[in-house]
Amino acid sequence: MAIDLRPYQEEVVQTALRGENSIIWLPTGGGKTRAAVYVTKRHLETKANAKVAVLVNKVHLVDQHYEKEFKPLLGKDYKIMPVSGDSDEKDFFGRVVKKSDVVICTAQILENALTNMDEEKHVELTDFTLLVIDECHHTNKDAVYNKIMSRYVEKKVDKEGNLPQVLGLTASPGTGGNRSLDKAVEHVLQICANLDSVIVSTKNNKPVLKKVVPRPIKRYDIVEKRHLDPFADHLKLMMSMIHEFMPPTVSVGLREKGTQEYEADVVELRKTGVLQENRLIAQCALHLRQYNDALLINSTVRMVDAFRLLDDFYKSVENNLLDGTDFFLQGLFEENRVELKLLASNPCFENPKLAELEHVLVEQFKDKSSRGIIFSKTRRGTHNLLEWVISNPELQRVNIQAGILTGAGTGAQHMTQSEQKETIKKFRDGGLNLLISTSVAEEGLDIKECNVVVRYGLLTNEIAQQQASGRARAENSIYSVVAEEGGRELRRELTNEYLEDLTAKAIEQVQSMNPRDFRLKISELQKTAVMIRIMAEKKMEERSQRFIPAGVQFLCNGCFTPVCHGDDFRSIENSHRVNINPLFKRYYNVGGQVTLERRFEDWEPGRVISCSKCGKNWGWEIKYKKVAILPCLKLENFSLNTPEGKCSPKKWKKVPFQVQDFDFTKYMEDRLDDLDLDD
């Protein structure tokens, strides 16, 4: 099937058509994916033994790219296979690659296949002749894209041949948080080095691009600061009482309550309490974070939402009170619960931002064909906003049918992948006309043109701002920023506008570099990156050999009870750390069954596990090969006692000892021996 490109698309694919590595920089809605399909088609037609991998960073984009672009345009002539974590094909990915012309998959699937030496699963980068990397600005730092491309760059630096061509796609590489042009240029060059690519954009067809992708009308819907907020004042008073309960020096350095800075402070304070085994400080910090979360919710949505957060939290811990600290904290909330509930139900002090949001939505949805997205920061925030929309008579009067779109996962407020797909389908088909979304809808999502996009209570970077703005593609669409006068959201939005312009200037400067100077700079950055990676791997190896496993003790973060040692752990598939000591079960209770939408080859989820003494959630069980029940622990719920003192690493790869691989045969033999001894 012939693929028609617009003039600006034809312009930006020329570098790729010459077989050179390139990053296509086009705005959201500019047709980057269509350009990639065109390059893929020409590559398959002209390259001997061609094989293409299309990498995406979100699961729902696998099916979207397959169904909307690659299958309709290339499916008749080529074998195209979509593979994601919820498909069986991931379990024999190596075989799938051999039999396919084009594989569309999440980056993690390819990364797993590169590291898995099982013949059915393993692939090499050299098995492909073209890598298409969607949302390629994520090829940075420890992101999965960069892990894949680090291997590529290392092979290039070592002068290994047969590396695939690279085609990156992005709406904005951003400035990397930098605010000067020189630093922004360095960031863009680093992205180019990571992808071993030049960055291309339209020069000769800007008017056409502007017509195809009209910029929405941006407006700031600003509200005055609350004159009176007795609910927040009461919460802050209770927080001060907790401060006074702690040792006098502890709360001195804590910053303003109800801010992200305060949250960072109490997270550090809890870490200090855990490392010192000071339960008073650790528990107070844990509860102060809940109060601070309530203040943040109160500043974004309804008072009743903030109250419910605290009420749910205290109900969840009321049966696990261990000492005087727990009784003080629980008692403080119970004594103030009625007063807080009364204040939260008083409409006189409700959040003025919600009234402004209501005004914006009513104004836009008077037109029955209107479609919109509200971007909110947290999953909880999206649920709170949905409840508000459903219960708001004015919004129901203009027939707003709202739904939530958040990231996939296993938590209480995560969506399953099928729920994501269903919500997106309803929005495309018109069953929903308003999405309330976290950042999951900012990138790559192919949805019908919206005429209203609202950024509500958000603090994000210039990339997210540009992508959110790009969702408003309809003619004369509105991009509204609902924010408090002089507030942080407003200041951040204005900063992002500056950074968006700075990104464009940085790209222009990179593109105007002398080609030889550009290549030398890229080569220099790549050699540096390879050295840094080798040093980091060496450092990680040294850290993993620092102590013998039996010399590292694990303590519950909730009650500081010693529960196991490092030599009790084994690694399954390099991603799950399980405790194989049969005596460990005396330390935990089991709860409800964990349900995962995805299926796995050798294991399935079991039940939630928690500390039998304090109720602290520890993780969940894994049922391995249907016979071995193994507790799988979240490291963040434990502190480690080592021969040189305490530490609390958050990731298993940072523990100061080596975790052996799980040997199922030996495990079963040991269990049988234990049974024989019992007899």
Image (tube, rainbow, N blue to C red):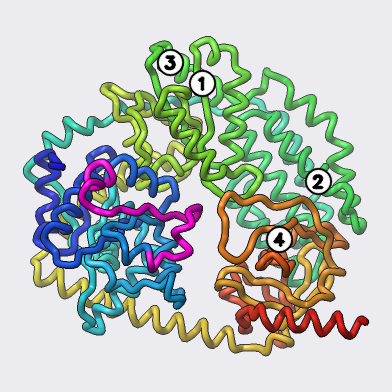
Image height check: is 487 above or below 656? above
Residue 381 screen position, x and y as percent? 58, 36
Q: Residues within 10 Å of mark 2 (few under 14, many from 20)?
A: few
Residue 82 lies in the magenta-colored region: yes
Name the image quarter holding the C terminus. bottom right
Three-letter amino acid code at disc 3? Answer: Phe
- Residue highlighted by disc 3: 365
- Decide if residue 327 is on the left or right side of residue 116: right
Q: Nearer the viewer, mark 4 or mark 3?
A: 4
Name the image quarter holding the N terminus. top left
Ranked by sequence position, the earlier of labels 2 and 1 is 2
- Residue highlighted by disc 2: 316
Residue 437 screen position, x and y as percent? 49, 36
Query: What is the CA distance from the residue labelled 3 to the residue labelled 2?
Result: 40 Å
- Residue highlighted by disc 4: 619
Report the residue at 17% width, 52% height from top.
41
Three-letter amino acid code at disc 2? Answer: Ser
Ranked by sequence position, the earlier of labels 1 and 3 is 3
Mark 3: secondary structure? helix
Q: Nearer the viewer, mark 4 or mark 2?
A: 4
Ranked by sequence position, the earlier of labels 1 and 4 is 1
Query: What is the CA distance from the residue labelled 4 to the residue labelled 2?
Result: 16 Å
Q: Which mark is residue 401?
A: 1
Query: What is the CA distance from the residue labelled 2 to the residue labelled 1?
Result: 33 Å
Report the magenta residues as a range.
Answer: 70-95
Report the residue at 67% width, 18% height from top.
348
Q: Nearer the viewer, mark 1 or mark 3?
A: 1
Three-letter amino acid code at disc 1? Answer: Gln
Three-letter amino acid code at disc 4? Answer: Gly
